[in-house]
Image (cartoon, rainbow, N blue to C red):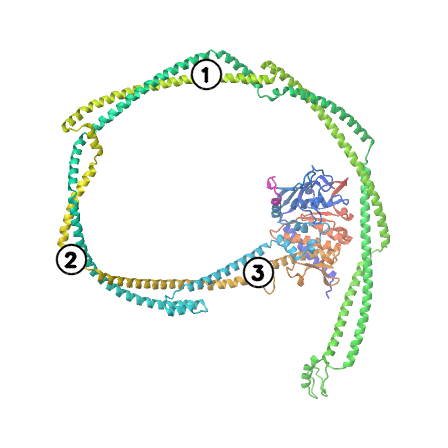
Amino acid sequence: MRKYSSHSSKPSMERRRRTIRNRYSILISKVMQMKPIRINMQYFGPFENETIDFDRVRDSMFLIGGRTGSGKTMIFDAITYALYGTLSTSDRAEGSVRSQFATDDDISSIRLEFEIRGKRYTIERTLSYSKAGRKTPVPPKAVLYDASGEVLEGSINGVKQKVLDIIQLNAEQFRQILILPQGEFKRLLTSSSEQKQEILRTLFRTERFVQFEKRLNVLKKEKQAENETVEAKIEGLFNTVSGGGLPRAQTLLETDYPTFTKRVAAIRDIQSLLEAEQKRMEEGLKENRQTLETKRGQLQQKQEHNRKLQELEEIGTQLTALETEHPEIASLEASLEEYRAIKEMEYALKMEDQALRRKAEAETALSELGAQSEQVDRELEQVLLDQTALGEKGALYRKAERWLNSTERFMGDEDIAHLDEALASLNKRKQEIERENGRLSKELESVEETLASESWDRRRSDQLNEEKFQLDNEISALGQEIEEEQGNRRYDEEKARLSGEIKAIDGKREAIESAREERKKRVKSRFSAADGVHIEHLVRHLEVGRPCPVCKQNVETLPSENEYLSEAEETELKKFEADLEALFEEKDTKERRITVIEELLSGKARREVAALEASLQEKRERRTRLAEEIEADRKKFERKQQLDQRQNELNRTLADNRLEENNIRHSLSRAENRAEEFRTQSGYDKYEDFTASFKKCRQALEDYQRRVMENEKQQQNCREQKSRLEEKLAYQKEQVRTLTDEIEKAAPQIDSFTEKTGRDRAYMLSVLERTDAASVEATIKSFHSRKEVLASRRTALLETVENREFQDTGAVEDEIRQLEEKGESLTNARARMLANIEHNKETSDKMEALIEQHNEELESLHALVALVDAVSGRNEQKVSLERYVLTYYLDRILHIANVRLLEMTNHRYELRRSTSKSSRKTGLDIEVFDFYNNRPRHITSLSGGESFQAALTLALALNEALQQESGGISLDTMLIDEGFGTLDPETLDMAVNTLMELQTHGKMVGIISHVEELKERMDNILEVTAVNERSTTKFK
């Protein structure tokens, strides 16, 4: 059993605390802060429009005080909801925090400004709520701004993700670490290993170890797949090796080989067989090629002789055909001669022909232009007559234009158009306002009389609420006293029960001891059977008269035959010992528990539960009566508010009506002045008559102006056409004269040639057009050239031919065909053999390279598999890399937490990481070790106050551990809700001192509590005051 001395351990604990504080002080200057700066709540809980400036308590501890139900916890809810859209406790629904007094037009919203890592952000959220006449609730909204007011995110999901990126905690983790809510401060302490793993993973950023493990597994799978791919490639390559159809090679391919190296050796053997076969094929192919060359020479000589005889026959046939073409060639030669004579007059003939055609065209154009000129003269005369008629009406239309210009401003003026209706409407509204003002004045007098007759006392209302608050505190205190006394009675009952059980244990022990002694007497001096071998061995070494090797005494006589206990007797004696040991431990446990109970009960004042319950009932009845008075006072206050509101509404309405009446008078005056101006300028009384006349006059003026412009344009067009026609007439006359000169100049030369040849102009032009001189010359030249070439070739062939008989070539061609087929077969067989040899060589080289790669990668793969197994926890310890790191961090956190917890609990409790089998999945469960009982206990067995102490020290330790991590998350804010009421005065003093130390290091600590001792010790108190469902805040 572990003995714990508080005297000897306190200096050691104090040194550990000083070490942690020094480390914390050094690191606190290196990390950034996460703190709320300012929050505004509109129609949130009891707050109608309330702003809290946390800059006043930026680096200190403050108390949030106020009566029960005033809305203290709502401040924590507002901070959590602004950040995450959820409340500080998971037991409260979102819809419950909208103000009960909010109307359908009032929007519930929160605006939170906070600072983290030196940067400021502002987040705004509006709550979802149901609205009358709307089937679905009004959806919530969220916007996140940076320090300059620029929008970072404007959607619900976008803001949610951005807040997670900035704070690096989700809502559940935020509640467990930064806020200790009412009823939930034990959640981090008692959460499961999996839940703690998620929190610690986020805070200490161990996700990288998980990702590292995943990447290693992916790499292992990739390497294994690559290894299998290489093996498949080697197998596939071997399957492509060819035996060339050789039986021995095929046998080698079909043999099973245990290793890749054996397969490469088999390929070498196959290569040797294929190369020998390829050499034999080369020799056969060479012999066939020589025989084939000889036969081809003989065939070529016979074919050359036969070809020459055939060519002589063809030349004779061609010369005979050329003789039949001779008359046609003579005719072509005569036509070509005539063409060459006429060709000399070609230029003169064509020039004369073109000039005659162009002269005829020019004379036709002259006739058409003269007719067009006469038509233009007639059109110009008519246009000038129209101009004279338009000029006679000019004065009338200029007068109309001046009237249109002076009255155009009235056209399209809606005020002038509806002036009569406006005057009637203004007069009507003036009369309505006068009647309404009379009615409102009477109602205002009635409301003022009612307000004068009814009164509401604010001081009385505050007294009632204060009395109710004091009664609530007294009822709460009595409830705690009753609960404490009932607990003390349970201790009394437990102590009595334990004392009775101890007496029963003493009786059992005495009975067992008596039975054991009785059994020992019956077995007398018999030895244990287990000692028999040693006893017999010792007896064999004893000699009479010589000293015993064990006790060194002289042996006088040797023992006779030894007797030993039976197995049943030994079992019975061992059972006696085991029963006695169990009873002793059970008694010791119960005595230690009685000692603890006596220490717990020592110094406590005891009271009757019945008297306490009677007092509690009496105070509850008083509270019920007081609540009824407060409700009546509240209704009276609401009636007064309604009357004040109605009075303000009536005064505002009367003022608005008087202002509107004054505006109507001014509008009437302006409207009457405009009506008089319209009648004077336009000459009309009705706006409709004026607009009709205006439009008719404007249309007539526009038509007149359009006709004048069209007449001027027609005059210009006629004159331009006349000028262009005169230019064209002059040009055509000049063309006729020039062409007549050209014709007269060319005629004498052509007339002289026609008289000489007897051919007229038309015949000569037709000869020039239809004769293709180049083609005729080519035909004549080709005829004579072919005839000369054929005669020359026939003479040459006759000189080289020995006889005129054809020679037979069939037998030689058959022999050559057979030799070629044999050669082709041998060539193909050799090519296939060479391809097989080359393919097998390439395959062998590839296999050797892959085998070398496979051996290298296999060694690397074995090392990688061993590393993956170690990182993933597939080893003897069954601990993964991340799990090992997280247990290290948790042990550090618990080490820091125990410095404070041991001091708070008078060195009774210490937090430890559970190592029981049920906790080995992640190893992050926490248990508490009770030094009074010298054994571990489940964390849920702690009382309310003990649980608060453990949760507080754990949260502080987690905070400090994070600060010690370079680049870790900085948590410089802690908010605690209703946890101190369960602490005794001494423990309360320790807890407050601990929190006081935090503010010296720049932390903001907010506490909600009704404990009076806290109020006395706090310099900063945020007082929450509630009046008729509405609350306000103020720092004191």
Density class for disc 1 (Cα within 10 Å; few <14, some 14-19, many ≥20) is some
Q: Which mark is residue 805?
A: 2
Q: Position of residue 639 (x, y in %)?
A: 79, 35
C-alpha separation, residue under disc 2 versus residue under disc 1: 112 Å
Residue identified by numbered label 1: 708
Q: Earlier in the sequence, mark 3 or mark 2?
A: 2
Q: Position of residue 828 (x, y in %)?
A: 32, 62
Looking at the rendered image, the disc whose residue lies closer to the viewer, 3 or 2, is: 2
Residue 577 found in image quarter = bottom right
Residue 813 found in image quarter = bottom left
Residue 418, relative to residue 288: is it above or below?
Answer: above
Density class for disc 3 (Cα within 10 Å; few <14, some 14-19, many ≥20) is many
Of 43 and 827, nearer the camera is 827
> Where the C terminus falls, by quadrant?
top right
Q: Earlier in the sequence, mark 3 or mark 1?
A: 1
Classify residue 573 as left or right of residue 404.
right
Residue identified by numbered label 3: 871
Span of residues in magenta? 145-159
Residue 923, relative to residue 424: is it above or below?
Answer: below
Classify residue 848 as left or right of residue 785.
right
Q: Element type at marker 3?
A: helix
Q: Element type at marker 1?
A: helix
Type of the residue with mark 2:
Glu
Residue 37 found in image quarter = top right
Of 804 and 465, nearer the camera is 804
Type of the residue with mark 1:
Val
